[in-house]
Amino acid sequence: MNILLFISVIFLSLIFNRTLVTKKLLLNYKGDNHQKFISSKNIPLSGGLILIFTSYYYLNLLNFTYVFLIFCVGFLSDIKKINSPKLRFIIQTLIVLGIVYFSSITVPQTKIIFLDQLLTNNTFRIFFSIFCILIIINGCNFIDGVNTSLVGYCLIISLSLHYLDLNGVEISQIVDFYNLIPVLIALFILNFFNKLYLGDGGSYFLGLLFALCLINTYQINNNISPYFIVCLLWYPAFENLFSILRKKNLSRSPLDPDTNHLHQIIFLYLKKNFNIKSIYLNTMTGMIINIYNLMCIVIATQFYSHTKTQILIITVNIIVYLFLYRKLLHKKLKNFKA
């Protein structure tokens, strides 16, 4: 691990955080209903800035340009310059369209016969890839609601891919994981102790970065099962897809924020049943989710080329998610009525 880069991130965060708090800039705000689960007020949303300032060490100029564009959308949201979810989504779509078109990073196949037939059409392949990337970007934004949830998840994926790389498995060269991992570890520690949040800028950055990296990994290495890629990204992807379905069922816009994501329901359950401060419950919620995902991804990494094993892991994950969601949502509604 690049220890100097790890120390640099810690030092950089101290500078950013002191400046932002002193100037009262880029601080989190608890005024909106969906933001009531954050740990406390006046914590800097500096995680995205740190990712940008350290990206020289793990991204080339072209790939930096891609993620910088999407970071800017999130950053403008963080500073309340783009408040409309619809406008953010439109800008995201245009950026991702440009990236997919010029980079040729597209989903080559899925091992689903009818879908693979459609993917032979270049136009369909481009728009399907845009759909997948947008699902990941916004899914990463959704799961970044409690401390360590997103940065921990991205760290787990990075360690998985770095492990494969060290063992001779060809993976995407979009990211230099040797240098990204210490950055994520530093951000994980800072987020764990509630010293900073990633903000929309940071979550969009990581969502796009890992979506491009994993799609490109499958493009260049057909020995990797496409369902291994799905397995690595299952949590943000399913969180987003499930959120769209349940909001549609309630005749609400999929873009409207709410307080019914899985991590929020787990948080409320812990708060109801344990006499612990919210600041600790917030981090505890993220760690519970991370530990589960770590176990799943460790198993998936060992069987990266076995499609049936990957499908089994994904299926179990979805069943566990839906079981927990139904069980805990019922308790939430019961407590609300009481």
Image (spheres, rainbow, N blue to C red):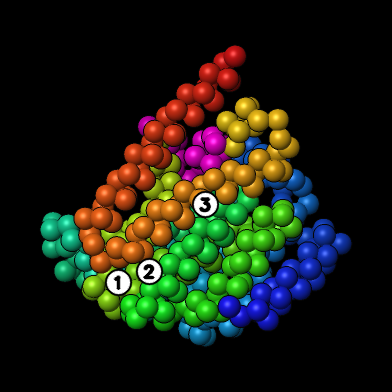
Q: Nearer the viewer, mark 3 or mark 1?
A: 3
Residue range of the region highlighted in magenta in the rendering: 247-266
Q: Nearer the viewer, mark 2 or mark 3?
A: 3
Residue 210 image-quadrant placement: bottom left
Q: Is residue 87 magenta?
A: no
- Image location of residue 335, percent across then percent down: 58, 20
Q: Earlier in the sequence, mark 3 or mark 1?
A: 1
Residue in view at x 72 percent, y 54 percent: 193
Residue 331 in view in this figure: yes
Which residue is the extreme one toward the top? 338
Q: Amino acid at mark 1?
A: Tyr
User: Label 1 near label 2: C-beta < 8 Å?
Assistant: yes
The residue under label 1 is: 218
* Label 1 crowd (10 A; few <14 / some 14-19 / many >=20): many
Q: Amino acid at mark 2?
A: Leu
Report whether 238 appears left or right of 182: left
Which SS does the magenta portion mostly show? loop
CA distance separating discs 2 and 3: 19 Å
- Image location of residue 262, percent across then percent down: 49, 39
Q: Nearer the viewer, residue 96 or 290?
A: 290
* Label 3 crowd (10 A; few <14 / some 14-19 / many >=20): many
The residue under label 3 is: 290
Residue 213 in view in this figure: no
Residue 160 image-quadrant placement: bottom left
From what the image shows, is residue 218 above or below residue 146?
below
The label number, if any, that marks residue 214 in the structure image:
2
Report whether 313 appears left or right of 50: left
From what the image shows, is residue 74 above or below residue 247?
below
